[in-house]
Image: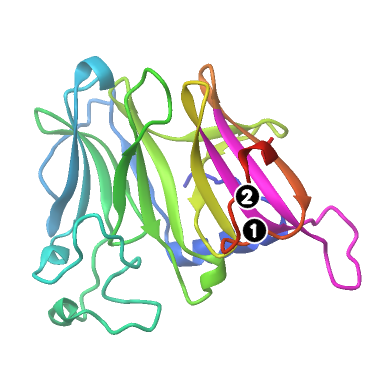
């Protein structure tokens, strides 16, 4: 499973909460170039939830990017297209009643959603299983003069609501392959998958910049590098910017005094590194 960027102590706590929601985590298969491509038959019990057309001139492949869900989610009264309910719509975590359409599904659990890249001839090039039965996928413009990126979101909210919530990753189809967005930290030089959370203590936004788009992240954090005071470790605001530099994404960050929470106004761009 790809690693994700984390901040200091509080973000590590958030990461632990997210991992608890994931079970075994996600799995990715990319068969391009291996000669082991399978025909694009829908997995048993799966349904096509959303599909994006791809063209060879722009994406390096004639085909489509698909989001698959458990076929039972399409039952009458099930979630509407474009709506992201909780991770498992038949097991709400906010105390709301179980939807009526879920009643005949018990005790069977819903299968996890999947993202896959398929050629126009029906060959499966790449497949990734997500953490939840439900997911959302939208197109976003991240880089100039390239095809779109695809924001894939699952809601990992739990009863610890302040530290859990929707998790978003970005995928791109580059030269006919499905690539999940990674970034290299400017200080550590580590390259990891970019995972963006929207919780009571963290948020992110897209910000146009120099013909492309930066990803800005704000999070309340704890400064574990400073000696603790009587009230504990100092609280800080972690500000992260992801930007595309020639042929890779780069992560830069800084901290400032104060503890940011998502009910506050998102920081101005000039405060980011």
Q: Is residue 124 above or below residue 109?
A: above
Q: Which mark, residue 6? A: 2
What sort of colour scheme is used for the picture? rainbow
Q: Nearer the viewer, residue 35 or 194?
A: 194
Magenta region's main secondary structure? strand
Residue shown at the point (26%, 18%) measured from the top left: 58
Answer few, some or many: residues within 10 Å of disc 1's Cα (few below 14, many 20 plus, some between 14 and 19): some
Answer few, some or many: residues within 10 Å of disc 2's Cα (few below 14, many 20 plus, some between 14 and 19): some
Q: Calculate the distance from the C-alpha at mark 2 to the C-alpha at mark 1.
A: 6 Å
Residue at image mark 1? 12
Q: Position of residue 39 (x, y in %)?
A: 12, 36
Secondary element type, mark 1: helix
Is 6 left or right of 52, judged from the image as shown?
right
Q: Nearer the viewer, residue 8 or 256?
A: 256
Q: Is residue 172 above or below residue 263?
A: above
Residue shown at the point (64%, 58%) measured from the top left: 12
Q: Nearer the viewer, residue 97 or 128?
A: 97
Secondary element type, mark 2: loop
Q: Position of residue 68 (x, y in %)?
A: 20, 51
Residue shown at the point (68%, 61%) measured from the top left: 10
Was residue 241 drawn as part of the magenta stretch in this picture?
yes
Could you tell me which quadrant the C terminus lies in? top right
Q: Which residues are magenta?
A: 214-243
Q: Position of residue 79 (x, y in %)?
A: 20, 65
The answer to the question of whether label 2 and label 1 lie on touching residues, with beta carbons closer than 8 A, is yes
Is 22 left or right of 50, judged from the image as shown?
right
Q: Which mark, residue 215? A: none
Q: Is residue 56 above or below residue 259?
A: above
Residue shown at the point (29%, 84%) measured from the top left: 97
Determine which quarter of the picture holds residue 116.
Answer: top left
Q: Position of residue 192 (x, y in %)?
A: 55, 38
């Amino acid at each position: 499973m790809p690693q994700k960027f984390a901040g200091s102590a509080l973000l590590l706590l958030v990461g632990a909460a997210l991992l608890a929601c994931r079970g075994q985590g996600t799995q990715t298969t990319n068969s391009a170039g291996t000669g082991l491509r399978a025909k694009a038959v829908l997995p048993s019990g799966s349904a096509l939830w959303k599909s994006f057309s791809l063209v060879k001139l722009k994406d390096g492949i004639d085909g489509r990017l698909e989001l698959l869900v458990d076929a039972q989610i399409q039952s009458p009264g099930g979630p509407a297209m474009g709506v992201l309910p909780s991770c498992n719509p038949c097991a709400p975590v906010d105390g709301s009643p179980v939807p009526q359409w879920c009643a005949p599904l018990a005790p069977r659990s819903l299968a996890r959603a999947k993202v896959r890249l398929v050629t126009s001839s029906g060959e499966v090039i790449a497949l990734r299983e997500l953490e939840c039965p439900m997911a959302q996928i939208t197109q976003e413009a991240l880089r100039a003069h390239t095809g779109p990126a695809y924001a894939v979101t699952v809601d990992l909210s739990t009863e610890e609501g302040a530290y859990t919530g929707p998790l978003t990753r970005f995928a791109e189809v580059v030269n006919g392959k499905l690539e999940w967005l990674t970034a290299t930290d400017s200080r550590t030089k580590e390259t990891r998958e970019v995972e963006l959370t929207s919780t009571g203590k963290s948020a992110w936004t897209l910000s146009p910049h120099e013909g492309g788009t930066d990803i800005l992240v704000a999070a309340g954090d704890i400064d574990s590098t400073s000696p603790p005071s009587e009230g504990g470790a100092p609280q800080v605001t972690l500000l992260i910017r992801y930007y595309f530099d020639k042929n890779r994404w780069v992560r830069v960050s800084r901290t400032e005094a104060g503890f940011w929470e998502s009910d506050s106004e998102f920081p101005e761009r000039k405060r980011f590194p």
